[in-house]
Image: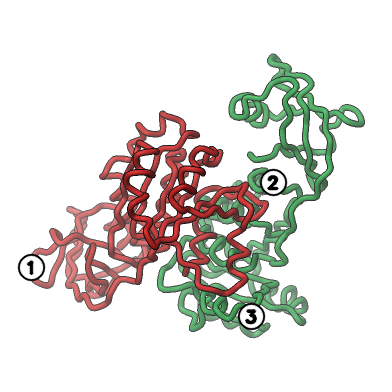
Chain colours: A green, B red
Amino acid sequence: MNIILFKKSAYINKSEIIIKDKKKYKHIIKVLKANIGDSIKIGLINDLLGIGIIKNIDKTEKTITLKVELNKKAPKKLNTTLILAMVRPKSLKKALHVAISMGIKEIIIIKTWKVDKSYWSSPLLLEESLNEISIEALEQAKDTIMPKIIIKKLFKPFIEDELSPLMNLKRGVIAHPIAQNSFFDINNNAEPFNIDYLAIGPEGGFIDYEINKFKNIGFEVFKLNERILRVEYAIPVILSRLI
Amino acid sequence: MNIILFKKSAYINKSEIIIKDKKKYKHIIKVLKANIGDSIKIGLINDLLGIGIIKNIDKTEKTITLKVELNKKAPKKLNTTLILAMVRPKSLKKALHVAISMGIKEIIIIKTWKVDKSYWSSPLLLEESLNEISIEALEQAKDTIMPKIIIKKLFKPFIEDELSPLMNLKRGVIAHPIAQNSFFDINNNAEPFNIDYLAIGPEGGFIDYEINKFKNIGFEVFKLNERILRVEYAIPVILSRLI
């Protein structure tokens, strides 16, 4: 937690908020070792960043009252929508974390052929869990703006009916281990490389049918290099090229 | 596991090996769903990559006999030594994984001021655990060459007596959140950016004393951008610039 995020509902008057979340309380007291009078970095969700001065610590109720001053814009987001194949929930959690903390503003989780059906019943996909993952990533990256996370369980209709009409003048790329061109080659010609849609496959990769569906609506296919990375590390490697 | 690594001791004759490791057995049978006659991707540790054809599966002993043919060199390593501050063991494990799977050939784990002393008693630092992490990362990245992992528990003597004499004509950089220059700016001038030594601090960052010790022996200081990333994601973001 490099900042403490709070919701509008935390306000108790015009300039003061109360933190009731146990995890944040513990972080402020145990990790930051903050005391009354100290100031900590805070942010209002979907709004500005700023400073909170500790006015009161209620050790019984485990709440902290802060006088807040918000004055700084959240860092810029990346202009890329991440299309992420559903992967094993543990990996998905990490992939979402890194994508959000690097500034991805929209993530679409899609169903692909090589997905264990049981993954879809993971509690991780509940709105509450996705919100929690998002807030944790924003608190890591000192960002306040919540990403949009969308789940699409029908591959073909998503590509053909929803994504296709959006592709006009947009650049879409797929990361695929057996592509001919590499992301690392692109970088060498020093042109800024904008990606509107970045699609990343499941652990076993997209199947040819899926690759072709993406290609049909204008996606280009790139690999990293010979080395295959876990999805949560492939994401920062590729996004690093867009910053 | 994108390849199965084995040691020389696995050979039962000139061209056949036996896999006794339970995790690898399970991977071959359950994930790859391989059967007698199928070929799987393999590699001899610190040697070549190749193919193994399944000759026998012993379901009682859970062993697999493979006829092996090794014919391909492991992918190139990066020419960077990673100097990594000891971090919480869970993060260290991830940081090592991504560094090794991206091709780092030498990692030096150092003691810094902002390190919880209890971390040093983690079993993760035992040679056996470090070997296991290394092999797992190599199997992910289809590499065979084991990295060197060194632990240095005395900061000042390491910097001044060991690292300093190696710095002649070498480039060392520190990733530090409050640096003036950013890794992302370097990239814009399209020059190849070689780093011989990359130092990454603990979660709270290096302290000024440590930064100055590095600077005294010629290290340059760079930040990422406003966003602060977990160490395991900062590593691929930076390494991505070196490939």
Give neighbour class at mark 3: few <14, some 14-19, many 20+ (Cα, 10 Å). Answer: many
Residue position marked by numbered label 2 in the rendering: A142
Subunit of label 3 = A
Locate the N terminus of chain B and report the quarter of the image it occupies.
Answer: bottom left
The amino acid type found where label 1 is placed reads Asn
Spatial CA distance of label 2 from label 3 is 32 Å
Q: A14 and B43: which one is in front?
A: A14
Subunit of label 1 = B
Residue position marked by numbered label 1 in the rendering: B13
Q: B234 and B129: which one is in front?
A: B234
The verdict on a common chain for dots 1 and 2 is: no
In which image quadrant can residue A15 be found? top right
Q: Position of residue A197 (x, y in %)?
A: 67, 71
Spatial CA distance of label 1 from label 3 is 49 Å
The amino acid type found where label 2 is placed reads Lys
Going by the image, does B159 lie left or right of B11? right
The verdict on a common chain for dots 1 and 3 is: no
